[in-house]
Amino acid sequence: MKRLGWLSSLLAIFVIYGFARIDAYSGVEDTSRQIQVITPEPVADESPMEVNADRLEYDADRRVMTGIGNVVIQQGDDVLTADYVEFHSETHDAHARGNVRFERGDEFWTGEEMHYNFRTREGDFGDFRAFSDPYHIRAKDSKQTAEGEYELRNVTLTTCDEEDEREFVIRAREARITDGTTIHARHVVVYQYGVPIFYTPYYRKNMAQRTNIDIMPGYSSRMGAFLLTGYRYQITPHVRGNTQLDYRHKRGFGYGQNFRWRTPDDSARGDIRLYYADDKKPIRDEREAGIRDGLIDNDRYRLGLSHTQVLGERDMLMAELNYLSDPFVQEDFFEDEFHSAAQPENRVTLVRRGDQYTASLLLNMRLNDFYENVNRLPEASLDISRQQIGDSPLYYEGNHSAVYLERVFPKGADRDDFDTVRLDSLNRIYYPTRHFGFLNVTPNVGLRSTYYSRTRDTRTVTNVVETVTEDGETVEEEEITTVDRSGPANIRNIYELGVETSYKAFKVLTEERNYLGKGLRHIAEPYARYSYVPRPNMRPRDLFQFDGIDRLDKQHQILFGARNKLQTRRRDRVHDMIDLDTFTIFRIEPERDERDFANLFFDARLRLADWVRINFDGEYDWYETEIARFNTQMAFIREDRSTLALEYRFDRDRRQLLMGELSLFPEQKWSFHMHWRYDIDENDLEEHSYMVERRFNCTGVGIGIRERDDEVRVFGQVWLLAFPGSELQLGR
């Protein structure tokens, strides 16, 4: 209980500090942006002055002009309006009262009283009000001391409008604004709903730079009580940082540092991700001990780099590098990233796109020896799009690559690594023709030649093993093992012969307007592809396996398919309500383990109404007369952005999953969000989460609960509505 007590105190301090500093970064900012108040500048030449009012009086002895009612004084770009103004024509001093507004260009200041000198362009602004998006700054008394510098008394700083400022407001006895952008405040108190929750003797804020404190307190059955914090800040106009300090009661402290960059023209963007945790309990129980022993210790970390660089109109560089302390650090501390990619990528790609080709250079290498990977060190490829050969009726298409491949297995695995140099070249010639005005027929021939510096030589080795029985007899037994060895270099040639044919037909079913749209048209496009590949000189069993190129083999088949569309017109554009593609494969010469017909494949996209979206795909087994695989996604969207999304996944050889997300009234004061994943075969609710959010006028509060992989997590979030999307992500 004592530990929970000091943890609660720590939590309170972070929450209070967060309210004092909370703000958010929302894109690249111009740091020259200034608070919208007047910055007087001395002028050498006085512009003509114009004075207008409902009533003007002039005191010749005092040389004072008095304007009463709708007073407007303008000199150059300085415009002063008020209910009452006394103007001294000799000194150019103006004393204004009542609904005072002072403008210069796009800048403005409002208040109830002010003194201003049109000659020196300095003055006492009195009641001060200014706006620096999204902050409102107000003061009971203000005085301009120099260009861009103000002294303020009784200051308030808030993202809320005046009538809502009790939700969140920072108050200070006195403050200074320097350079038109930075506020320095003393004796600062932060209020939440009128309750003082934090005090600091000094506070500094650059209004041109966005910063934010992200706070997520909560409790996890796996981690204990936790507090995840992130301090986001802008380093330069195009670089921002995020410093993380996390505490998990059962696991200890974690520290992170991220940097993200993006150029103004978006030609370069990327980020660096660093995280370290001194994990007090990396192995929770005996079940994990059998899996994690020898792979994990108390020092847990990850280092990540992503970068995309546009090098020109045609060239692009992409990089993704990740180095981890162990194979479980993502799963333990970055769950959402782990579920989207269990093994992070390590690759660098340089791509050039020409008018009729794409060239690339890829470097892919395993950085952590506890993963399995196919290293490409490097791979150069050239893809030539289908294009006409001179003035002939023939077309050419090619795919070429050169790569050093290395298949590496996790450290300690009972398999040996293997490698080869592979040069692959695929060349196809097409002869497109059209018959009867509608039938497209395209014969094609191809040759794929692949060079391997090493091939696979599989040999059976018989060893005689002696064993001693319980009676003391010695018995000899033969032990047969299969050994893969490196064979000599060789070239595999694969010849291809094929024909593609298709046609398109349509019928207008109606031209009347109905609730689906204007008119209805059906489009049918049957197609077939015949391909013949004789048995190559090298079979897959003769090659080390790296990817799909090495699995190519004899093929003699016909693919039959049909694509059907149902179209209408919505908002003066053609709209596909139904787009369905179905196909199957007839194997003319099936292998021993193959049937004559492959499954029936289908892929559909339904957009019957603007508020519903349905996709589904799968396979039907002709021989077993049952569905072999079926996936569907459905989304129902209301005008208020409430959404119900359902996804069903069925694999006859694996399992059935039902997933769903529900978001109710996301833009209203009260909103509700729910997510779940259910294993139908195991009757197991694998994951489910619920979150309730309450939006006040300028602040938002949320509380949620999630259960995943036998872990229960309760968490809370607080954010300012001026910065949408500033909440901490749930997965960290």
Image (spheres, rainbow, N blue to C red):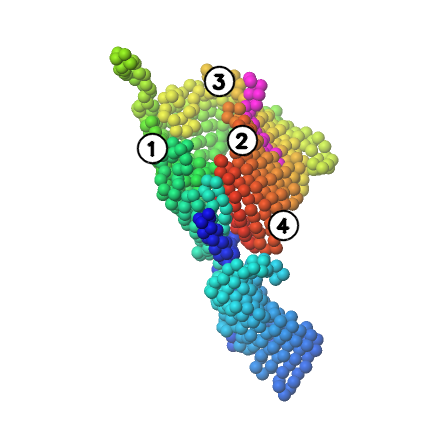
Which of the 4 image quarters holds residue 318?
top left
Tag on residue 594?
3
| Residue at mark 4 | 669
Crowd band around label 2 with a 10 angstrom C-alpha radius: few (<14), some (14–19), many (20+): few
Q: Residue 466, position in %: x, y?
A: 26, 15
Tag on residue 684?
2
Disc 2 is placed on an element classified as strand
Left/right placement of residue 677 relative to residue 53 reads: left
Q: Most extreme residue toward the bottom, as rendered?
A: 61
Q: Residue 562, position in %: x, y?
A: 59, 26
Q: Residue 258, position in %: x, y?
A: 43, 49
Q: Is residue 33 above or below residue 243?
A: below
Q: Amino acid at mark 3?
A: Glu
Looking at the picture, tell me which residue is in the foreground, 175 or 54. Answer: 175
Alpha carbons under labels 2 and 4: distance apart: 34 Å
Can residue 12 be found in the magenta stretch?
no
Q: Is residue 504 above or below residue 298?
A: above
Which of the 4 image quarters holds residue 165?
bottom right
Alpha carbons under labels 1 and 2: distance apart: 34 Å
| Residue at mark 1 | 411
Disc 1 is placed on an element classified as loop
